[in-house]
Image (spheres, grey):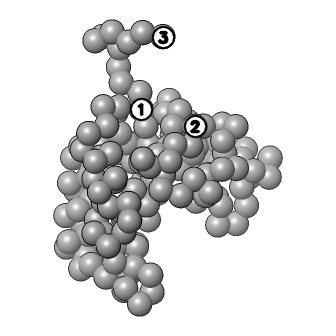
C-alpha cells in the first residue's frame, strides 16, 4: 500500500525496556533506543502500564536491578517521553481483551502485565510493539507484530 501525505502514520507502542535503554547510558542498546525515539516516523505511544513500569524500575535501587533515580528525575524523564508520545488509555475494551487472553491461556501470572500492554495497543489500533526483549511478547505474535529495537 502506498502512503500519501494524508495517510496517518502507523501507531506503534513503545515497550518499557526501550525507554529504560534510552535513559540508561550503560545499556548496550542505549544509542539505538535514543535513535528510535528521536527518528522513527511512526506515531509512538505508551500505555499506562508502561508508564508505571518505567517509574518502578527507574526509581528502584541499583542493587535491586533498578536505575536508582530520584522520583523527580524519573518523573521528569517520563514527562519528556509523554510529550512526544501518546498515552493510550485503558478502558472496558482493553479489560475484555486481557480477560480473553487469560481465558485462552495466552497469558497467566506475571505475563498478564504484558497482555495488558497488548490489549491496550490493540484496542487503540496499534498493530506493532517495539521492544528490546521480544521474548516477553512472543506469545502474543499471533495478535500483534513484535518488532525488535534496531
The foreground one among 115 and 21 is: 21
Q: Residue at x 62, y 57 (%)?
A: 135
Counting residues from the N terminus, which is met first, the one under dot 1 or under dot 3? 3
Q: Residue at x 24, y 79 (%)?
A: 70
The foreground one among 80 and 134 is: 134
* Residue 117 visible to an observer of this rendering: yes
Quarter location, residue 88 = top left
Q: Mark 1 or mark 2: which is in front?
A: 2
Give the structural element (helix, strand or loop) at label 3.
Answer: loop
- In the picture, the disc for residue 11 is 1
Quarter location, residue 84 = top left
Dot 2 alpha-carbon crowd within 10 angstroms: few under 14, some 14 to 19, many 20 or more:
some
Give the structural element (helix, strand or loop) at label 2.
Answer: strand
Q: Which residue is mark 3?
A: 1
Dot 3 alpha-carbon crowd within 10 angstroms: few under 14, some 14 to 19, many 20 or more:
few
The foreground one among 124 and 60 is: 60
Q: Are marks 1 and 3 in contact (CB under 8 Å)?
A: no
Give the structural element (helix, strand or loop) at label 1.
Answer: strand
Vertically, is 49 above or below 148? below
User: Furthest residue to the right?
Assistant: 104
- Residue 61 x, y percent position in the rendering: 36, 86
Q: Residue at x 80, y 47 (%)?
A: 104
Amino acid at each position: 500500500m502506498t502512503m500519501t501525505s494524508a495517510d496517518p502514520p502507523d501507531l506503534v507502542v513503545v515497550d518499557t525496556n526501550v525507554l529504560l535503554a534510552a535513559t540508561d547510558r550503560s545499556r548496550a542498546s542505549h544509542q539505538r533506543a535514543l535513535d528510535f525515539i528521536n527518528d522513527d516516523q511512526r506515531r509512538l505511544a505508551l500505555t499506562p502500564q508502561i508508564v508505571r513500569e518505567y517509574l518502578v524500575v527507574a526509581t528502584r535501587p541499583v542493587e535491586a536491578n533498578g536505575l536508582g533515580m530520584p522520583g523527580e528525575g524519573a518523573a521528569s524523564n517520563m514527562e519528556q517521553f509523554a510529550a512526544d508520545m501518546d498515552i493510550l488509555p485503558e478502558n472496558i475494551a482493553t479489560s475484555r481483551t486481557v480477560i480473553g487472553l487469560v481465558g485462552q491461556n495466552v497469558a497467566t501470572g506475571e505475563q498478564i502485565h504484558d497482555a495488558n500492554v497488548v490489549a491496550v495497543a490493540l484496542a487503540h489500533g496499534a498493530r506493532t510493539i517495539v521492544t528490546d526483549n521480544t521474548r516477553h511478547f512472543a506469545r502474543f505474535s499471533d495478535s500483534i507484530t513484535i518488532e525488535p529495537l534496531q
